Each structure stands twice: as structure tokens, then as C-alpha cells.
Amino acid sequence: MRHFTDRTDAGRRLAQRLQEHFAAQGETPADADLAAPDLVVLGLPRGGVPVAAEVARALHAPLDVLIVRKVGVPWHPELAMAAVGEEDAVVRNDSVIAASGVPRREREAAEQRERDEVARRASRFRGGRPPVSLAGRTALIIDDGIATGASMRAACAIARARHARRIVVAAPVAPADVIDVLRDEVDEVVCLHTPADFMAVGMHYLDFHQTSDGEVERLMP
């Protein structure tokens, strides 16, 4: 089933759910004066940024990126055997590595290529600015969907390294079993749809075109 028209639609729906979620906890993120000091919205480039931008706008919160890169199996790039990110974050899917049989030297070379891409994107998307401080704040980490969870777990590792007080993961769609794993690793998880027939994130969007670097740059403050 196609749940979302595009990432903007998904972001607006996710923002509404998050407003309800925070309000139920006695927080008032719709009030800019109260939300901004504590909450930071963090999109995973590239596809997570259009979703996160809608959430940041609705919650009156600052928007930044957490740069992570999936390390795909060479003959099946969409299948993540690892994810790497800023702050030297790395998360490996041991079951995928074992099943694929990718030699360690080849995997490490692939991880280094993606680390180089992390550095390039961090410089480009922030325009040379330092990351928004997460120390003592709530990091609301958003992607356009979660498949294996490797990229999101790497993003959470970055937020921890930057001393976030609380980590909240949010996505429009993800498999239920991955959401269960994430709930054990972060403070809160908000997900709009956990379909039993989940196959790929793009299957749940009518328009899932590849987000460009330029689009990310235009959305960043």
C-alpha cells in the first residue's frame, strides 16, 4: 500500500503525530519559545531531510543533519552490511556480513569510501558551519523510512557522542521488528506505519524520487 504522496506529505503527517506525542507528555513543542531551547530536529540526508524540514517547521525547532552512509553489499547495494557516520560512528549488521560472505578487506574498503562521502556531505550541507549543539538537548532523528535500522542506529551513536540528553527516533514507515529493536536502544520511537508486508521504503510512497544535494541545501537554514 502507498501510504504517502511524497516526502513532504510524509513529513506533514509525521509532524502532526509528533505534536500529539509531545503534547501527551505535557510538552508544548508547537510553542516556539518553549520548544527551541531543548528540541533539535535532525534529518538523515538525503531523503530524510525533506521529511525533517516539515517537522522542524511545525515544531518551531532548529533543523540540522546527521550524516550517515549505508555500506551496501557490493552486488546488492540496498542491503546494508554496515552504516558509518560522523564522529566515526559505525554500526555493522553481523548477520548480513556473515550471509553475504564479503571479505573483511573488501568491507573495510567500502566503509572507508562511505566515510569519505560522509565528510564531503557534512561540509557541503552545513556550508562550513559547525553542527547544532545537542548537549543536554532532545535529539529528534528523522528519516523518510527505516529498513534494516543500521543507518538510524549510526545516527543515534552520533547523537550520543554529542551528548544529547534524550534521543527520539521518528519515521513515516518501518518494519515492526526493527522498530522493536530501536525501542530498546533509544528513549522513544514514533512511527506512522509498520506494515506486515514491508519490503522497501520506496514501496510506500507514490513519489520517491532521489533527493538531490541541491534540494537538501535549499532546505537547510
Image (cartoon, rainbow, N blue to C red):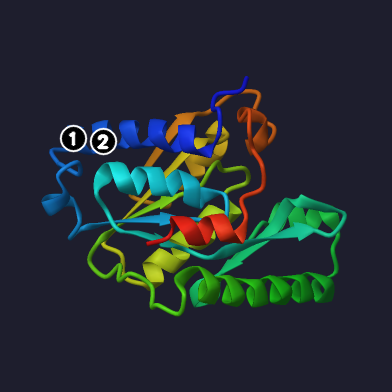
| Percent of width and height locating residue 62 | 30, 58
Q: Which residue is mark 2?
A: 19
**Position of residue 63 in the picture relative to residue 20 (left or right):** right
Q: Would you say 56 lies left or right of 118 here?
A: left
Of the pair 76 and 117, the residue shown nearer to us? 117
- The answer to whether residue 66 is seen in the rendering is yes
Residue that mark 1 sits on: 23
Amino acid under disc 1: Ala
Q: Which element carries disc 2, helix, strand or loop?
A: helix
Helix, strand or loop for disc 1 = helix
Whole-percent x, y for residue 107 in the image:
78, 69
Q: Quadrant location of the C terminus? A: bottom left
Residue 184 makes an appearance in the image: no
Residue type, numbered disc 2: Gln
From what the image shows, is residue 47 above or below residue 37? above
Q: Are marks 1 and 2 in contact (CB under 8 Å)?
A: yes
Q: Position of residue 132 (x, y in %)?
A: 33, 69
Q: Residues within 10 Å of mark 1 (few under 14, many from 20)?
A: few
Locate the N terminus and report the quarter of the image it occupies.
top right
Identified at 24% across, 62% down, the residue is 137
Residue 79 percent coordinates (x, y): 74, 50
* Relative depth, front residue between 84 and 38: 38
Residue drawn at the location 20% of the way across and 56% of the way down: 36
> Within 10 angstroms of label 2, few (less than 14), some, or many (20 or more) residues?
some
Q: Residue 214 bears which disc, if any?
A: none
Q: CA distance from mark 1 to mark 2?
A: 6 Å
